[in-house]
Amino acid sequence: MASSEPTTSITAFARLVPTVDQTISGNLVFVQKDGSVTISLELTGAAPNSTHGFHLHGFGDTSDNKGANMFGHFNPTGVPHGCPEAGQNSPIQLKTGFHLGDLGSITADESGSVKQSWISTELSLDDASAKGFVLGRGVIVHSAVDDCTTQPTGNSGARLAQGVITTGEGNAFTVKNVATSSKDNAIAVFDGKVVSGTVIAKKAAASDDFAFLYNLTGLPESTDFVVGVNGYTGGKECKDQLFNIKSDAKGAAAGSSSASGFAPGLASILGQTLLIEKADCKPFATSPIGARNATLDAAPAPPATASPVPPSSGGSATTSATGTEATTAGKSTKSYAQDPRTLLSETPRQASVGASLMLVIGAALLLL
Ligand SMILES: [Cu+2]
């Protein structure tokens, strides 16, 4: 951070929500000050005296109810998995040389609660050019202890709670060094409390506007809405407006829209809040915008044959993955072998045909 602002702190957080049939929930607060980010966790609902692997993950895509879409550990530097040293007092100093998301394990007290904090000099909340830029990335609480040695997962087991690292509505700060990227892809997942479904933001080419693909239910029927991103002011009728949607007679809205004149890099919306506003410009539903296949590097333009991603059905399982650490092992290892920077872009959609076949075979094996 700039030394001219030694006492200015900025804050982000992640709300941890239990995956299907699970009970752990909590809140993770990130405070960046004087060149370090302190992470403070408070959670409840764990089994008494239980220990759980706890990591930042590469994607902030909560659309799978077992956490299977959160990808592997946040590892933008392409290094091995490990753990911070045990026995440290809070805050635990995160180690360099391991995944930037390697927070180790957490242990609940007799009431099933956890309070723990960490400190890192590698993470950043507001510098999109930093490897450790974490806005929009994910957080996972696992079922098992992180063994600190199994690569690249720590063999931490199923995913019991998931969350997206977000500034939160009303807490926007300026993200600097935003690069334009051809790999931009982000997702806002509406959990069904008000609205269910997803809004996906993506670009086919770096110079394009974002295309937004939406598939939402639970809206008031036959009603006009505007969709916007907190902190973005386009000078339109409603603050932060990007595009308009209208629900049908069943309260559903599905389709795509490009936001004319809105063409910043992905980092300008990652971790911000997506707003669905009624005609009076008041938010009706909100969701953090999480990374989904997001590298943030300035990549060459993709082939013109790139196909759009259809909106997924929010809140339901959309893949055959079981949501355990083991299911991501193949993808992560493969990515390291290619190029560390492609770690977060490794999906069946963008992988080579060969890699896609490997993933299909891997998924088939998991079903056996
Ligand atoms: Cu994990």
Image (cartoon, grey):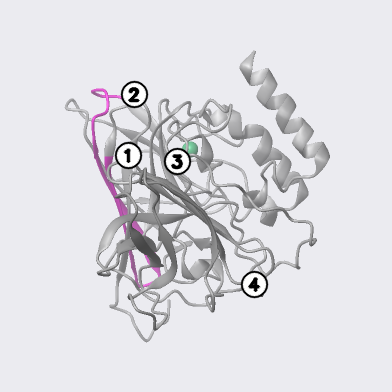
Element type at mark 1: strand
Q: Which residue is more in the foreground, 355 or 209?
A: 209
Is 29 inside the magenta-drawn segment? Answer: yes
**Disc 2 CB within 8 Å of nearest ligand 1 atom:** no
| Residue 102 in picture, x, y percent from top left | 48, 45
What predominant SS class does the magenta segment belong to?
strand
Q: Which residue is mark 4?
A: 208
**Is residue 283 shown left or right of residue 252?**
left
The circle drawn on residue 21 is: 2
Residue 153, picture quadrant: top right
Q: Residue at x 48, y 61 (%)?
A: 122
Element type at mark 4: loop
Depth-wise, is mark 3 or mark 2 nearer the camera? 3
Q: Which residue is mark 3?
A: 314
Up/down of 64 relative to 21, above or below:
below
Give the alpha-carbon distance from disc 2 to disc 4, as whole Å.
Answer: 41 Å
